[in-house]
Structure formats: structure tokens, C-alpha cells
Image (spheres, grey):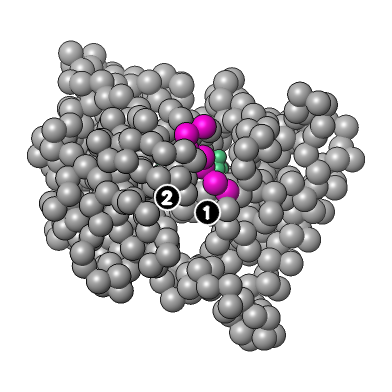
Amino acid sequence: MQLPNFLKTPMFQQRYEWITKPLDFMEKAVKQYPDIFTSQILGANKPIIFANHPQAIQEILTNDRKKFTAPGEANKTLQPLVGDYSVMLLDGDRHKRERKLLMPQFHGERMQTYGNLICTITEKVFSQLPQDTIFTARNVTSEISLSVMLEAVFGLYEGERYQQIKYLIIEMLDLFRSPLAFAFLLFPILQKDLGNLSPWGHYLRQREQLDRLLYTEINERRSQSDITNRVDILSLLMSAKDEHGNSLTDKELRDELMTLLIAGYETTATAMAWGLYWIYQKPQVREKLLEELDSMGENPDPISVSRLPYLTAVCNETLRIYPVALATFVREVQEPVELLGYQIEPKSEIWGCIYLLHHREDLYPDSKQFKPERFLERQFSPYEFMPFGGGARRCIGYALAEFEMKLVIAKVVSGYNLALADNQPEKAQRRGVTLAPATGVKMKMQGIRPPQKSVVSAVGK
Ligand code: HEM
């Protein structure tokens, strides 16, 4: 099979570098082959093409239901976590149907309700941090993100079941955090139930417990008469019907809940921790942001906050410089295609490389510098800036993730005096399939920031 710009480094070295130092691996490769190259990070029989030229990305993502597909099979390592009916594992028409049921739940007027919820949870979590103590931003944003998931997505509030589900989710995801543990997902041969003391056996028992709780919740919800008045995503999904009038089965509901959780909880928490890091690392950014936030007065409406131009630019620049997801899911070539002058044959597998796209000097000069202004000065196309991927598998929760990121950052920066606890620059490190701050961002709580007198913002003018 003809493949563009095959990397010459030995396969094992490529795999090792991709797992341990993914940014160094990609930056070394792109110096040699700037727009597109083929790697062997997944093994000799599974070459992966990394494409980062906007023209190639546009060609792939606008045709990924015809010339290309976005095969669910490529995500099957996640099956033990998300189940067989997860949107991530479905293909073709079933995948389309599932997205149609899921997508509307993350848009429209329900965002207002989620907005109030996000602000209340943020306030609750931050107000409990003792003054003059050091905390890890990522742990705190994880607490917020998980609570938002449980309340907005699962519709669960305080109570025994809420606490049990929260505990089990944290435990289960912890199991897959280290590269060694992640190997259990990569290599099905390791997935042997050798009793509760073996890692896989322990995981299976926790999963059974969690499933029992989720099915009990679903059953109780089905018997409630007020389900149509509820605005959480589980209730909305339970009432949603496809064009044939079919609704989701209990198993499908369970698998989609797990999918949204796995895809949405840690990613959003990491993005928010990065955001806080950059804001407190760059005093000018913080000042400009505070000026904009203070111009909104006390307790501004969440939707208006989410439209603030400088806050939006800060969040975009955060997602650009260290995108939480390094690449899109796999796209597979279906018919002979030409990409950037290279002939690519059917069955070839391609990743749209988000990290390398976001560091193209022709799009983002001084790409290693954090400069939110670039998003005020220029409008980037969806093939130039794509933290949430695109096309057939574009992130389903992107609107919720962006909204949450903006509201949490706005609430924290305007409501508290914080500082970074460490002067060393934060390094980016692989955490499962995401790119996260290596230390989690150590910060110091210095107390409440009193409300400021409203000023007219000069930001963006
Ligand atoms: C900052 C936070 C997030 C980032 C950076 C992110 C990024 C991504 C990316 C890059 C993809 C793959 C897109 C592609 O292949 O073209 C994706 C898919 C997905 N994301 Fe997100 N995501 C985030 C938050 C969320 C949230 C909050 C949810 C749900 C509540 C979510 C649910 C999903 C789902 C279900 C898919 C799979 C879609 C499919 O298979 O059709 N994500 N996300």
C-alpha cells in the first residue's frame, strides 16, 4: 500500500515516543514532513497517517460519510467502559440516528438551566477551599466537572445513590489512568476475571455495581409522571424518539450515559485547569479578563457571560495551545483519494492531528506563546481551529464543554484571589488519551475577591 512520508524511525521507538512523549514525537516528525506523514505507532499492520494541513483536514472531514468513513470499530478498545451501544462504537445509519437523538440535548434553552447549575456548583466547590492553602486545580475542576455531569446529564442530585455513583465512577476511571493500567483496555488478552483482587476482576465488580445503580435510576425515572418536566439529559433522552417513533432501550441509555461521562468529564476538567494556569501565568491576560468580567456587574446572566469576546478568546487559546485531544478519531479511506498531491488507497487510516494543526506557524505565528488576541484579530475556519474535531464524529458535548469552561473560569477569576503556587512552567503530559498539565497546576487560595465597581469594558475595542 502506498502511504505518504513513511517515518523511518524504528516502529518500537515510534510507539515508545508516542506513548511517553507524544508532543516530541509529533514535532520531530513534522520537521521532516510538514503537512502529512505516516507513522507506525499502532503496529506494523496498522499504519496511521497524521494530517495537519487545513486543506487535507477539510477534505477528510467534509467527506467522512462517503470517500472516508469514521469507523466505530476503531474505538472498540473503549467497549468495556462504554458498552456495545455507545455512539462512539456505532457506524453508518445507526451512528447518525444516535447522534440525532443526542445532539439536541446539548443545545438551546436548556443551556440557561445548565448555566445556573454550573455557577452554583463552582461557588460551592471553591468556597470550601481553605484560605492560604495550596490546592491542585485539576482536582478541583474535576470535582466541578463530575458534579455538572451527574446533575445536568444524569439528573442526580445529593443523596445516597448520587454519592455511590460518584464514588464508583472516580474509582473506575482511576483504574485506567496510568499507561500500564491503560494496557488493560489496549490488550483484551489481559481482560481476565481472576477475582476481586485482580485488577480486571475488581473493575468488573465495580462496573456491575455501577450498572445496578444506573438501571435502578432508569427504572425509577420511567415510573415517574413528571419526567417530561425534567431538563436533565437522561430524562430528555428517555422521552426522545427517532423518525420511526422508536426510543432508546435501557441498555442503550446506560451505554450513552457512560459514553457522555467518559468523553466529557475528564476532558472538560483538564481544559479548565489549563485555562486557570494560563490566566494566572500571564498577568496582562488576567487584568484584561477581569476588566471585561467586572464590566458585567454582580451575578451576570450566564448566557451573556458565555458571549464575552475576551473570555471566549482566552478559552479558545487554551484549547489551541494544548488541545486536550491530540487528534480526531480514525477516518478510513473508502475509495482511492488524493490528499495534498499524494494518492491514498482504500483502507488507509487517517487522524486529523489537532495538536500539529494548532501549532502551524502559517496560522498561528509564535504558536508556543499564549496570545488570546489572535482570536480577536482573525476568524479561524473549522479546519484551522478544531479542538472538538469535526464532520461525522464532531464532539457531541462541545457546546456544554465550552459553556462550562467559560462560566467556571469567569466565576473563579472574578470571585476569588488566587495565585500559582509554583513559578516553574507547567509541562504538558499524556494522561490516558488526553494531554494534561503534568502537576495538575498547583494554586494558592488567597481569599474572596470583593465585587468591583462596574466599569465599561475596553476589551475587544
Ligand atoms: C474540553 C472538552 C472536550 C474536548 C476537547 C472534546 C474533544 C472531542 C474530540 C476531539 C472528539 C472526536 C471528534 C472527531 O473525531 O472528529 C470528541 C468526540 C466526542 N465527544 Fe467530546 N470533547 C470534550 C467534551 C465533551 C463533553 C462535555 C461531552 C459530553 C457530555 C463529549 C462527548 C463526546 C462524544 C459522545 C464524542 C463521540 C462522538 C461520535 O462518536 O459521534 N465531549 N470530543
Question: In the orientation shown, which residue stands out farthest toward the left?
Answer: 366
Depicted 371 relative to depicted 206: above or below: above
Q: Nearer the viewer, mark 1 or mark 2?
A: 2
Q: Is mark 2 within 8 Å of ligand 1?
A: no
The x, y position of residue 21, in whole percent, is 26, 65
Q: Which residues are magenta?
A: 66-72
State the residue at coordinates (67%, 56%). Answer: 83
For the residue pair 112 and 18, the one nearer the viewer reads as 18
Whether residue 154 sits left or right of residue 61 in the image: it is: right
State the residue at coordinates (42%, 65%). Answer: 45
State the residue at coordinates (82%, 32%). Answer: 246
Helix, strand or loop at label 1? It is helix
The x, y position of residue 421, in whole percent, is 22, 59
Q: Are marks 1 and 2 in contact (CB under 8 Å)?
A: yes
Which residue position is annotated with label 2? Answer: 349
Residue 304, image quadrant: top left
Residue 407 visible to the viewer: no
Q: Earlier in the sequence, mark 1 or mark 2?
A: 1
Residue 71 covered by magenta stretch: yes
The x, y position of residue 54, in whole percent, is 27, 32
Q: Is mark 1 within 8 Å of ligand 1?
A: no
State the residue at coordinates (28%, 30%). Answer: 55
Which residue position is annotated with label 1? Answer: 74
Residue 136, image quadrant: bottom left
Q: CA distance from mark 1 to mark 2?
A: 10 Å
Going by the numbered disc 2, the residue's amino acid type is Glu
